[in-house]
Amino acid sequence: MKTICLILALIGSTLHAANAALDLSKQKLGKAPKGFTAKVTGEGKAGTVVVREGEIPAIIGGGKIKGRFFEVTGGGKNANHYTLIMLDALAPDDFSGSVRFHITGGKILPVAGIAFRAQDEKNYYLLAIKPTDTRLYWSVFEKGEAVKGRRDNAILPAPGGWHDLKFSAKGNALTWTLNGRNQFITYDPKKVPDFRKGRIAFWVRADTRAEFAQFELLNPAEIQAKRHREILRRVARTDPRVLSLQLVARTAPEEALKIIGSLNAAEVGKPAHADCAKAMKENKNFHGRKNDEALVTIPLRDKNGVIIGAVRMHLRSPPGTEKRRDITRATALTKQIQSSFPDSKSLFQ
């Protein structure tokens, strides 16, 4: 048990360091971001990275979104020069994430991408884009050389030149989508170096200049919490009276109930309200009131009617509203949530 706790603590500290570095609101504009180190393979010195602010094309609906991003400039004029702006914190063993990027300059060979599972600046997996040829490369680098690779010669166009990359890693396998297109290059994980641990880096070739924005990196617990939040948001949109919505369960049989999903991401992982335990143990609904809000807790059942958790919510409820009406509304919302969780196992996938 002590070993497990230590491992979880290390994972937590690693992700905390990574997430802190990715919070660009806390990085200084015009300066190199903290939490990253510029590294180089090949001739010349490592390139540079600074934090910028500007407008980024929206993926949906057109228009632009104001935000911050990393601007990376390669440090060499040789085609075999590679600059990696590497995240200091180790990535989780398994992870999911996304990033948007586009190339803004470069005379030698404008190519940019993301290095995954980097052991150092010479050994890593790479996904890179060469926009002039509408081409994507998947490569394995060993000792600074691309030793294995595949390519797609007809990638989908990127709105405003900004490519949208979503990726995930499990075991030694990477999967991804680019600009909304699903896995279009496959490889056998058994036939590549087994990089199960490593770092992530922004990667540019030669003198390429590129911008990287909206970079997100999640561990399995964060992936789960994000999925839960998306389910709860979808349910909450069906009723404008929903003020808050929590999904509660035990992560282990003997552990106390915790919030495993919430509209408010900051609540995830915190102890559940006492009414949740009562609702599950007594198979009862609980109702409370605070001014013009109703606080309702409902047992969450699987497809066979077995209680696997609880749902707790705050609803707008004018003074004088009957308790029965609040519970009826809360029960309907809980049934929508139940449809996404047919059994207890599905809560943690």
Image: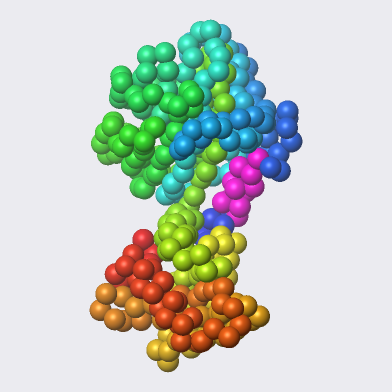
How many numbered discs? 0
Res. 300 in view: yes
- Is most of the magenta stretch helix, strand or loop? helix
Q: Which residues are magenta?
A: 13-24
Q: Front-most of 245 and 137?
A: 245
Residue 168, by quadrant, is: top left
Tell me if residue 288 comes above or below residue 230 in the rendering.
below
At x 60% / y 24%, what residue is drawn?
72
Is 18 contained in the magenta span?
A: yes
At x 61% / y 42%, what residue is drawn?
22
Residue 262, percent across and down? 51, 65
Tell me if residue 57 comes above or below residue 252 in the rendering.
above
Image quadrant occupied by the C terminus: bottom left
Q: Front-most of 269 and 9?
A: 269
Residue 193, percent across and down? 35, 35
Is 51 contained in the magenta span?
A: no
Residue 325, percent across and down? 46, 82
Residue 95 horizontal side relative to residue 264, left or right: left
Tell me if residue 227 comes above or below residue 296 in the rendering.
above
Tell me if residue 26 comes above or below residue 141 in the rendering.
below
Q: Front-most of 96 and 265?
A: 265
Outermost residue, bottom side? 282
Res. 204 in view: no
At x 52% / y 43%, what residue is drawn?
216
The image's colouring method is rainbow
At x 62% / y 78%, what residue is drawn?
292
Q: Front-most of 66 and 266?
A: 66
Residue 125, percent across and down? 41, 32
